[in-house]
Image: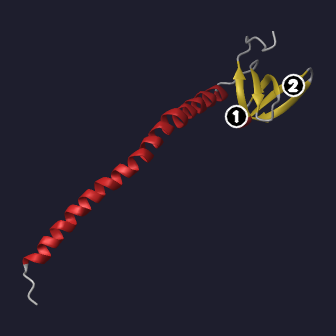
Amino acid sequence: MFIPFTAPVAAAAAASGAAASSGAASFLSLAPLLLVFVVFYFLMIRPQQRRMKTLQASIEGVKKGDQVTTAGGIVGKVTRVEDQLVEVEIAPNVRVRVVKATLTDVVGPNAKPAND
Protein backbone atom coordinates (compact mmCIF):
# COMPACT_ATOMS: atom_id res chain seq x y z
CA MET A 1 0.00 0.00 0.00
CA PHE A 2 1.40 3.35 -1.05
CA ILE A 3 0.70 6.42 1.09
CA PRO A 4 1.59 9.73 -0.49
CA PHE A 5 3.99 12.00 1.40
CA THR A 6 1.46 14.85 1.55
CA ALA A 7 -1.00 12.87 3.65
CA PRO A 8 0.85 13.34 6.96
CA VAL A 9 1.24 17.05 6.26
CA ALA A 10 -2.47 17.45 5.52
CA ALA A 11 -3.37 15.47 8.65
CA ALA A 12 -1.11 17.64 10.77
CA ALA A 13 -2.66 20.80 9.33
CA ALA A 14 -6.14 19.51 10.07
CA ALA A 15 -5.13 18.58 13.62
CA SER A 16 -3.64 22.03 14.27
CA GLY A 17 -6.85 23.66 13.04
CA ALA A 18 -8.86 21.49 15.41
CA ALA A 19 -6.48 22.34 18.25
CA ALA A 20 -6.91 26.05 17.59
CA SER A 21 -10.67 25.79 17.70
CA SER A 22 -10.55 23.67 20.86
CA GLY A 23 -8.27 26.30 22.45
CA ALA A 24 -10.85 28.99 21.77
CA ALA A 25 -13.56 26.74 23.15
CA SER A 26 -11.58 26.11 26.34
CA PHE A 27 -11.06 29.86 26.78
CA LEU A 28 -14.78 30.46 26.36
CA SER A 29 -15.51 27.80 28.96
CA LEU A 30 -13.19 29.62 31.42
CA ALA A 31 -14.67 33.05 30.69
CA PRO A 32 -17.58 32.73 33.18
CA LEU A 33 -15.17 31.68 35.92
CA LEU A 34 -12.98 34.67 35.15
CA LEU A 35 -16.01 36.95 35.19
CA VAL A 36 -17.11 35.59 38.58
CA PHE A 37 -13.64 36.24 39.99
CA VAL A 38 -13.62 39.84 38.71
CA VAL A 39 -17.07 40.52 40.20
CA PHE A 40 -16.03 38.85 43.47
CA TYR A 41 -12.93 41.06 43.62
CA PHE A 42 -14.84 44.31 43.14
CA LEU A 43 -17.74 43.43 45.45
CA MET A 44 -15.93 41.62 48.25
CA ILE A 45 -12.14 41.86 48.33
CA ARG A 46 -11.60 45.52 47.45
CA PRO A 47 -14.11 46.98 49.97
CA GLN A 48 -12.67 44.74 52.70
CA GLN A 49 -9.17 46.03 51.94
CA ARG A 50 -10.42 49.61 52.21
CA ARG A 51 -12.06 48.87 55.59
CA MET A 52 -8.86 47.28 56.87
CA LYS A 53 -6.78 50.30 55.79
CA THR A 54 -9.10 52.73 57.58
CA LEU A 55 -9.15 50.53 60.70
CA GLN A 56 -5.35 50.30 60.74
CA ALA A 57 -5.09 54.08 60.37
CA SER A 58 -7.53 54.67 63.22
CA ILE A 59 -5.70 52.17 65.45
CA GLU A 60 -2.38 53.85 64.75
CA GLY A 61 -3.95 57.23 65.55
CA VAL A 62 -5.63 56.22 68.81
CA LYS A 63 -5.08 58.78 71.56
CA LYS A 64 -6.02 59.45 75.15
CA GLY A 65 -9.74 60.06 75.56
CA ASP A 66 -10.88 57.98 72.55
CA GLN A 67 -13.56 55.38 73.06
CA VAL A 68 -12.51 51.95 71.78
CA THR A 69 -14.02 48.52 71.34
CA THR A 70 -11.86 45.40 71.58
CA ALA A 71 -12.24 42.12 69.73
CA GLY A 72 -13.57 40.62 72.96
CA GLY A 73 -16.39 43.16 73.09
CA ILE A 74 -14.99 45.36 75.85
CA VAL A 75 -15.87 49.03 75.41
CA GLY A 76 -13.93 51.67 77.26
CA LYS A 77 -12.08 54.95 77.24
CA VAL A 78 -8.36 55.16 76.46
CA THR A 79 -6.32 56.50 79.37
CA ARG A 80 -2.77 55.77 78.14
CA VAL A 81 -1.21 54.83 74.80
CA GLU A 82 2.05 52.90 74.39
CA ASP A 83 3.74 51.41 71.32
CA GLN A 84 1.95 48.05 71.35
CA LEU A 85 -0.49 48.45 74.24
CA VAL A 86 -3.37 50.71 75.19
CA GLU A 87 -4.72 51.20 78.70
CA VAL A 88 -8.51 51.28 78.65
CA GLU A 89 -10.77 52.36 81.51
CA ILE A 90 -13.83 50.09 81.40
CA ALA A 91 -15.42 51.33 84.65
CA PRO A 92 -14.55 54.00 87.22
CA ASN A 93 -11.06 53.16 88.52
CA VAL A 94 -10.96 49.87 86.55
CA ARG A 95 -8.28 49.86 83.88
CA VAL A 96 -7.11 47.07 81.62
CA ARG A 97 -4.18 46.91 79.25
CA VAL A 98 -5.11 45.84 75.74
CA VAL A 99 -2.96 45.02 72.72
CA LYS A 100 -3.53 47.61 69.99
CA ALA A 101 -3.99 44.91 67.34
CA THR A 102 -7.13 43.66 69.12
CA LEU A 103 -8.98 46.96 68.77
CA THR A 104 -11.93 46.68 66.39
CA ASP A 105 -13.37 50.19 66.61
CA VAL A 106 -12.04 53.61 67.56
CA VAL A 107 -14.44 56.50 68.18
CA GLY A 108 -13.34 60.04 68.94
CA PRO A 109 -13.81 61.54 72.40
CA ASN A 110 -16.72 63.80 71.33
CA ALA A 111 -18.85 61.03 69.81
CA LYS A 112 -22.38 60.55 71.09
CA PRO A 113 -23.28 57.20 72.68
CA ALA A 114 -25.49 54.93 70.59
CA ASN A 115 -28.38 54.91 73.06
CA ASP A 116 -28.77 58.70 73.43
For this rendering, which residue is in front, 76 or 97? 76
Give the quadrant of the N terminus. Answer: bottom left
Circle 2: is it few (<14), some (14-19), or many (20+) Cα within 10 Å? some
Disc 1 marks which residue?
83
Look at label 1 and name its amino acid. Answer: Asp
Q: Nearer the viewer, mark 1 or mark 2?
A: 2
Q: Examine the image and state in which quarter residue 72 appears.
A: top right
Q: Pick out the residue farthest to the right.
A: 93
Left or right of 68 on screen, residue 43: left
Q: Residue furthest bottom?
A: 1
* Residue 90: mark in rendering: 2
Q: In the rendered view, tell whether residue 31 sits above or below residue 79.
A: below
Q: Residues within 10 Å of mark 1 (few under 14, many from 20)?
A: few
Q: Residue at x 73, y 32 (%)?
A: 103
Mark 2 residue type: Ile
Marker disc for residue 49? none
Residue 84, placed above or below residue 75: below
> Is 76 or 24 nearer to us in this picture?
24
Q: Are marks 1 and 2 in contact (CB under 8 Å)?
A: no
Q: Give x and y (percent) for residue 61.
A: 65, 25
Mark-to-mark CA distance, 1 and 2: 20 Å
Secondary structure beneath dot 1 equals loop
**Of callouts 1 and 2, the N-terminal one:** 1
> Looking at this rendering, what residue extends furthest in the front direction?
1
Query: Which quadrant does the C terminus fall into?
Result: top right
Circle 2 — which element? Answer: strand
Question: What residue do we see at 77% from left, 27% from top?
Answer: 69
Residue 25 falls left or right of residue 63 = left
Image: 41 above or below 2: above
The type of colouring in the image is secondary structure
Quarter residue 6 falls in: bottom left
